[in-house]
């Protein structure tokens, strides 16, 4: 049925919803890039029957991998001379 994203903004703890896990991960990454403290993402409704909440180290690994990919993609590559 859906996924939620729990994050901190200033002194508030807020929640957003997403259609599925992929969308929730993307939204969490966007929040992280905007320097929001993302606490967790997780399923609700029917999705909760076959998936689990993502938080802590597992969530940090996702953010780190995303950052590493973006850094590599942003690094200019030398021109090939033929």
Image: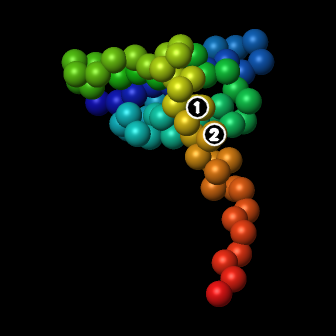
Q: Is residue 36 above or below residue 49?
A: below
Q: Does residue 47 appear in the picture of this structure?
A: yes
Front-most of residues 80 and 56? 80
Front-most of residues 65 and 38? 65
Q: Is residue 81 above or below residue 18?
A: below
Instruction: Name the outermost residue toward the front.
Output: 82
Q: Is residue 19 left or right of residue 25?
A: left
Quadrant of the drawing holding the C terminus: bottom right
User: Which residue has dot 1 on it?
Assistant: 63
Q: Is residue 67 left or right of residue 6?
A: right
Taking the spot 39% from the left edge, 28% from the top edge, the residue there is 3
Mark 2 lies on a secondary structure that is helix
User: Which residue has dot 2 on it?
Assistant: 67
Instruction: Give coordinates of residue 70: x percent, y percent.
Output: 63, 48
Taking the spot 44% from the left edge, 40% from the top edge, the residue there is 23
Residue count near mark 1 (Cα–Cα under 10 Å), binned few <14, some 14–19, many ≥20:
some
Instruction: Name the outermost residue toward the right.
Output: 10
Instruction: Name the outermost residue toward the bottom.
Output: 82
Q: CA distance from mark 1 to mark 2?
A: 6 Å
Choose top left, top right, bottom left or bottom right for residue 80.
bottom right
Q: Is residue 43 left or right of residue 36?
A: left
Front-most of residues 2 and 82? 82
Q: Is residue 59 left or right of residue 30?
A: left
Instruction: Give coordinates of residue 56: x percent, y percent.
Output: 53, 14
Mark 1 lies on a secondary structure that is helix
Task: Find out whether the residues at labels 1 and 2 contact each other: C-beta distance under 8 Å.
Answer: yes
Q: Does residue 16 appear in the picture of this structure?
A: no
Choose top left, top right, bottom left or bottom right for residue 30.
top right
Residue 5 shows which numbered tag? Answer: none
Taking the spot 74% from the left edge, 30% from the top edge, the residue there is 35
């Amino acid at each position: 049925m859906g996924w939620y994203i729990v994050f901190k903004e200033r002194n508030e703890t807020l929640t957003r919803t997403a259609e599925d896990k992929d969308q929730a991960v993307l939204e969490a990454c966007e929040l992280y890039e905007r320097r929001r403290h993302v606490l967790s993402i997780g399923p609700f409704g029917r999705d909760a029957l076959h998936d689990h909440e993502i938080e802590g180290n597992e969530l940090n690994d996702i953010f780190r991998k995303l950052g590493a990919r973006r850094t590599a993609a942003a690094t200019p590559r030398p021109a090939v001379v033929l």
